[in-house]
Image (cartoon, coloured by chain):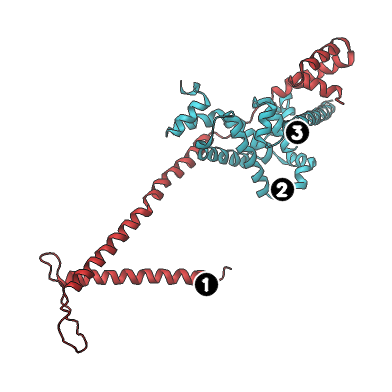
Amino acid sequence: MQSKLTDIELIEQSLAGNQGAYAILIKRHQRFVFTLALRFAKNREDAEEIAQDCFVKAYRALAGFSGQSKFSTWLYTIVYTTAMTFLRKKRVDTTSIDDENTYIQLENQSSGLENNLAEQKSRSYYVNRAIAQLLPDDAMIITMFYKGEQSLEEIAEAMSMEANTVKVKLFRARQRLKEKLEHTLKHEAKELI
Amino acid sequence: MNTIEEKLWNYIDGTCTAEERESIATLIATDEVYSKKYKELLLLNAEFTNIELDEPSMAFAYNVMETIRTENAMKPLKATVNKNIIRGIGMFFAFTIVALLVFTLSQVNWSAGGNSAPVINFTMPQLPGLISSTTVYAFLFVDLILGLFLLDNYLRKKLTNATPQQ
């Protein structure tokens, strides 16, 4: 019954000292936050660390949540800043952030996703793999737009950007994604033949 | 100048104006290029919508809650080190010392000794019952120890500050 409560109701309960309510909020958003973290970290351990850090930070700042925006938008702002701090700490320099090839290399090194042979057959797998090859910002925008139920304005708020910038980035990200998908699927088809 | 793809994405996302929407819909219906591209983008859009979210470890929520619980458990400890309590204890000791000094000085026979160098006839307070001379000495001794302890702390801090960091 409790899981049917809205985010705002759960926040109110959490602020009143009910930690169980916050646990429900975590379970509700953990997959999405973890996926966003994975767009930046590229490995599950680091992504989990970022995601955990986000929820702890959100809990500490919960009293400051005004409710003017959606809780998810507010939470994704924390995810974005935490992930960016993580990248800086990991000394991934700005040139490599702009260099898509770095992320293609990182993706090639990551082993977690590749191990599942059954999943390799699915088209969803290729889409996910193509997203992982995008720049973190682009991957985050794509994920937030399609899976986070966030409008361009909300994404802009979470990422401290102009809505128009987000729109342009989304368009370019979709174009890149399309190219990557076409390339990957063509390559896979050749291998199968 | 918007490209065909850009226009179509705006149409699919619903971010164009009503007029634009109408004109794009007409183009899709009449123009083969638009129609083909639209179908292609719709398919792509459906694929993006179906991307799967990754699942964190089973203990994820538990780990977060544990971290929060640990932080919360440490807060009351901080709260007990209340500066007002420390001030209160300090004031109590200061008041006791002042009261004792006033009482002791009031017991001194200042007129004794005439014009010669004043010899203070120090008589220990004879408080009935609890306060004996031994108690007073013990109290002063504890004060002395506390004073020395504070002085030691102060000198140690001064020494630490003076030592350059490596």
Residue A42 visible at all: no
Q: Position of residue A5 (x, y in %)?
A: 49, 23
In depth, the one of B63 and B32 nearer the eye is B32
Query: Chain B appears what colour?
Result: red
**Type of amino acid at the residue the image marks with label 2:** Val
Disc 1 to disc 2, how far (Cα)?
38 Å
Disc 3 to disc 1, how far (Cα)?
53 Å
**Type of amino acid at the residue the image marks with label 1:** Ala
How many other residues sit within 10 Å of disc 3, few (<14), some (14-19) or many (≥20)? few
Which of the numbered marks, if any, corresponds to residue B162?
A: 1
Which of the numbered marks, if any, corresponds to residue B77?
A: none
Asked whether, in this view, residue A22 is left or right of residue A46, the answer is left
Residue beneath disc 2: A92
Q: The C terminus of chain A appears in which quarter of the rendering?
A: top right
- Who comes first in sequence, dot 3 or dot 2? 2
Check contact, mark 3 vs mark 1: CB within 8 A.
Answer: no
Residue beneath disc 3: A165
